[in-house]
Amino acid sequence: MKTCLPLLWLAISFALPTYAQQRNTPDPKLRERFVSCFKAFIDALDKSDVAAAAANFTEDAVLGTPYGPVFGQQAIQAWYADLLKTVQLSIDFFPVDEDSPHVLGRAGN
């Protein structure tokens, strides 16, 4: 029995790193779609096109702002319209790094 314990410990110590590997790598097609949507949103803001920027949100979307949440696509469009009256956004504020986006949320949606 005493000779089995070191062998068992050795087997477990080699098996655990295998199970610790990260398996949730993003799907390349999903990543490409996310990057293209993000670029379209940033381009719309850069052109001050609030309708095109708001079109990237769903009807029941919630936008988190420093002043509190904004609920719904129409309210988000109005919020961006008010924002762009006082602030000129530039693409320099939102650089798109194709290696960094990760989709958060429910899988497959």
Image (cartoon, rainbow, N blue to C red):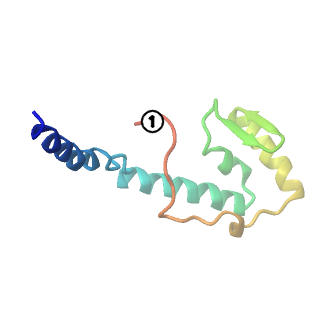
The residue depicted at 47 percent of the width and 64 percent of the height is: 99
Return the residue nearer the eye: 39 or 101: 101
The residue depicted at 86 percent of the width and 47 percent of the height is: 82
Quarter of the figure with residue 32:
bottom left
Q: Residues within 10 Å of mark 1 (few under 14, many from 20)?
A: few
Q: Which residue is mark 1?
A: 109
Provide residue 8's location: percent of width, then percent of height. Answer: 16, 40
Horizontal arrangement in the rendering, residue 19 relative to residue 84 (left or right): left
Provide residue 77's location: percent of width, then percent of height. Answer: 74, 42
Return the residue nearer the eye: 63 or 11: 11
Horizontal arrangement in the rendering, residue 90 relative to residue 33 (left or right): right
Q: What type is the residue that disc 1 sits on?
A: Asn
Secondary structure beneath dot 1 equals loop
The residue depicted at 81 percent of the width and 48 percent of the height is: 81
Return the residue nearer the eye: 105 or 78: 105
Horizontal arrangement in the rendering, residue 18 relative to residue 51 (left or right): left
The residue depicted at 67 percent of the width and 50 percent of the height is: 53
